[in-house]
Image (tube, rainbow, N blue to C red):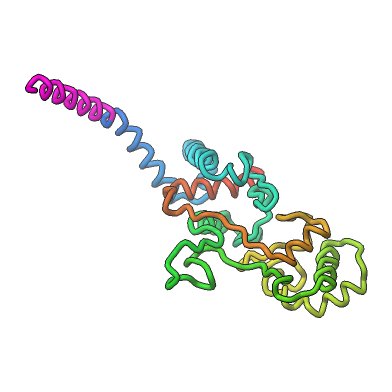
C-alpha cells in the first residue's frame, strides 16, 4: 500500500510540474492576447484597419468564431441561404442604415445583434419586453391566413409587394391591396423600403430572405416568419464579439 501511495504521489508531482510548465509557457501568449483584446475593444474600426497587427488578430478571432458558431447557418463565406441572412451583402435587417458617417455606429449595431440575438425568448417571463428578452432584436411577421385574411386578399398583397419591386402586376390587385398596406407600414415603411429599428425588410430591392417568387411571398404573408439567431453574449468574449462585428462590417463593405 505504501508503494502504491508513493507511486501515486510521484505521478501527482509529475502532473503538477507539467501543469506549471504549461502555465509558464502559455503566460506570455496569454498576456499578449490580453493586450490585443484591450486594444481591439478600445479601437475604432478605422483604427483596427490601420493597424496591421490588430487587423490580423481581429481576423483570427473572427474566423475562429465563424468556424465554430456561424458557418453552420450562415455558411463559411457568410452568404447565408434560404431563411438565413447573407451577412456580407450590405443589406441589413437591423440597425445599420448605410448613412452612418463612421464605422463605429454600425459595428455597435452588429455587436448588439450578436450579443443579444434575434427573437431570443430564453429568459424569465417577468423581464420580457414585447415578447422577447431585453435588448434582443424582436419583431413579428404575422401569419395573416391564421388571422382570417382570405386567399384573394393575400394574393392582392403578393401583387402589391411585387409591384413595389418594379414588377408588372395586376393594377386592380394593387389598388385593392393599398387599402390594407397601412398595416404593413410600421415595419416596411410607406414606400416599402423597410424600417431598421423593427427589422422590417426592404421590399423594393431584389434581395429576399425567403425567396421572391409569388408563391414564396404568398407563403410568408399567409404563414408569417419568426427566424431566430442565438444570443452569443454568454459564450463569446467581448473581444471576439467586437472582432466578429468589425469583420462582418468590413466584409460587407468589400474590405
Q: Residue at x 51, y 47 (%)?
A: 47
In the rendered image, residue 116, in percent from the top left (x then y), is placed at 49, 59
Q: Quadrant where the C terminus lies? A: top right
Side of 241 relative to 207 (left or right): left
Count of numbered badges drawn on the protein: 0
Relative to 253, residue 20 above or below: above
Camera-nearest residue between 216 and 79: 216
In the rendered image, residue 216, in percent from the top left (x then y), is placed at 78, 58
Magenta span: chief secondary structure: helix
Can residue 51 be seen in the rendering of this structure?
no
The reply to whether the magenta stretch includes residue 185 is: no
Q: Quadrant where the N terminus lies? A: top left
Image: magenta residue range: 1-22
In the rendered image, residue 158, in percent from the top left (x then y), is placed at 82, 66
Give the quarter of the image for residue 251: top right
Q: Residue at x 48, y 50 (%)?
A: 242
Q: Residue at x 29, y 28 (%)?
A: 25
Q: Residue furthest bottom?
A: 179
Camera-nearest residue between 140 and 150: 150
Q: Residue at x 67, y 65 (%)?
A: 200
In the rendered image, residue 212, in percent from the top left (x then y), is placed at 79, 56
The reply to whether the magenta stretch includes residue 15 is: yes
Relative to 225, residue 68 above or below: above
Side of 218 relative to 143 (left or right): right
Side of 154 relative to 130 (left or right): right
Amino acid at each position: 500500500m505504501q508503494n502504491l501511495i508513493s507511486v501515486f504521489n510521484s505521478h501527482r508531482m509529475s502532473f503538477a510540474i507539467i501543469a506549471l510548465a504549461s502555465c509558464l509557457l502559455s503566460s506570455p501568449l496569454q498576456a499578449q492576447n490580453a493586450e490585443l483584446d484591450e486594444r481591439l475593444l478600445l479601437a475604432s474600426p478605422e483604427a483596427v484597419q490601420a493597424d496591421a497587427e490588430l487587423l490580423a488578430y481581429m481576423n483570427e478571432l473572427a474566423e475562429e468564431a465563424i468556424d465554430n458558431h456561424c458557418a453552420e447557418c450562415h455558411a463559411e463565406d457568410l452568404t447565408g441561404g434560404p431563411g438565413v441572412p447573407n451577412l456580407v451583402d450590405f443589406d441589413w435587417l437591423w440597425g445599420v442604415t448605410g448613412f452612418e458617417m463612421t464605422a463605429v455606429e454600425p459595428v455597435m449595431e452588429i455587436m448588439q445583434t450578436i450579443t443579444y440575438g434575434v427573437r431570443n425568448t430564453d429568459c424569465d417571463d417577468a423581464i420580457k419586453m414585447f415578447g422577447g428578452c431585453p435588448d434582443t432584436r424582436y419583431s413579428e411577421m404575422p401569419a395573416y391566413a391564421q388571422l382570417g385574411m382570405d386567399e384573394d386578399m393575400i394574393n392582392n398583397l403578393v401583387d402589391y409587394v411585387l409591384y413595389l419591386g418594379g414588377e408588372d402586376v395586376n393594377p386592380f390587385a394593387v389598388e385593392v391591396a393599398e387599402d390594407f398596406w397601412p398595416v404593413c407600414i410600421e415595419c416596411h415603411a410607406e414606400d416599402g423600403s423597410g424600417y431598421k429599428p423593427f427589422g422590417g425588410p426592404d421590399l423594393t430591392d431584389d434581395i429576399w430572405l425567403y425567396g421572391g417568387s409569388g408563391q414564396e411571398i404568398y407563403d410568408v404573408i399567409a404563414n408569417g416568419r419568426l427566424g431566430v439567431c442565438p444570443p452569443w453574449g454568454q459564450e463569446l468574449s467581448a473581444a471576439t464579439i467586437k472582432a466578429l462585428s468589425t469583420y462582418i462590417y468590413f466584409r460587407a463593405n468589400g474590405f
